[in-house]
Image (cartoon, rainbow, N blue to C red):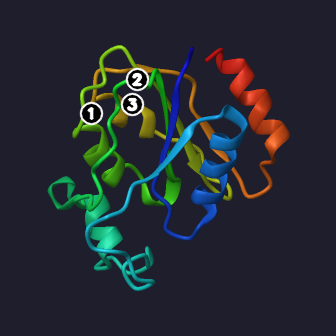
């Protein structure tokens, strides 16, 4: 039997909503990736080149630490990992580098109002030795039926 974990980072709640839908549809468990220092609206202001998120995107050594790094991945065959695409991979790289991933499937999903994945998946692949499945960008209009269809296409 394929046991699934849905891990996500969400700043505005959009990624959280879709992660919960994926967990419901797949029968998977849910885990929120929480930064040690929570983000304020000023931290997330990508128009400000000195905002926390802008600095973290430019400087890999300033990636955020995770406050609740507790999931036991034993027994999980597949892990869905979600994040808002505008924030890119920083906190997700921290998460991936914190565990042993051999033999596990990773399915990346990003939330966006219009941006694509860019190089995100290629960057994340460098952080761990898992089997990456087809990634997907989800929007606010993504519903349970389309998530179910996507999960079926993954064959996990």
Q: CA distance from mark 3 to mark 1?
A: 9 Å
Q: Nearer the viewer, mark 2 or mark 1?
A: 2
**Residue 122 numbered mark, or none:** 3
Residue 75 to residue 33: above or below: above
Total label count?
Answer: 3
Q: Nearer the viewer, mark 3 or mark 2?
A: 2
Q: Is residue 75 left or right of residue 18?
A: left
Measured as percent of width and height from the top left, residue 135 is found at 56, 31
Q: Residue at x 40, y 20 (%)?
A: 104
Residue annotated with mark 2: 75
Of 126 and 91, the residue lying toward us: 91
Q: Residue at x 36, y 79 (%)?
A: 43
Dot 1: within a 10 Å radius of its alpha carbon, few (fewer than 14), some, or many (20 or more) residues? some
Q: Earlier in the sequence, mark 3 or mark 2?
A: 2
**Residue 127 numbered mark, or none:** 1
Q: Secondary structure at mark 3?
A: helix
Measured as percent of width and height from the top left, residue 23 is found at 63, 42
Measured as percent of width and height from the top left, residue 69 is found at 27, 51
Q: Residue at x 58, y 36 (%)?
A: 28
Q: Secondary structure at mark 2?
A: loop
Q: Is residue 120 left or right of residue 24?
A: left
Residue with the most extreme right position: 145
Of 133 and 102, the residue lying toward us: 102
Measured as percent of width and height from the top left, residue 41 is found at 45, 83
Q: Earlier in the sequence, mark 2 or mark 1?
A: 2
**Quarter placement of the C terminus:** top right
């Amino acid at each position: 039997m394929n046991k699934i974990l849905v891990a996500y980072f969400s700043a505005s709640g959009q990624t959280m909503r879709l992660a919960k839908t994926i967990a419901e549809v797949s029968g998977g468990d849910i885990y929120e990736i929480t930064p040690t220092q929570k983000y304020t609206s000023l931290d997330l202001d990508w128009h400000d080149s000195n905002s926390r998120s802008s600095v973290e995107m430019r400087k890999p050594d300033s990636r955020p630490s995770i406050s609740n790094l507790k999931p036991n991945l034993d027994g999980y065959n597949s892990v869905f990992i979600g994040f808002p695409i505008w924030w890119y991979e920083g906190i997700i790289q921290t998460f991936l580098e914190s565990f042993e991933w051999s033999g596990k499937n990773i399915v990346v999903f990003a939330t966006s109002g219009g941006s694509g994945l860019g190089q995100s998946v290629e960057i994340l692949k460098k952080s761990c030795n898992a089997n990456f499945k087809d990634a997907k960008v989800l929007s606010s209009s993504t519903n349970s039926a389309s998530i179910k269809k996507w999960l079926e296409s993954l064959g996990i």
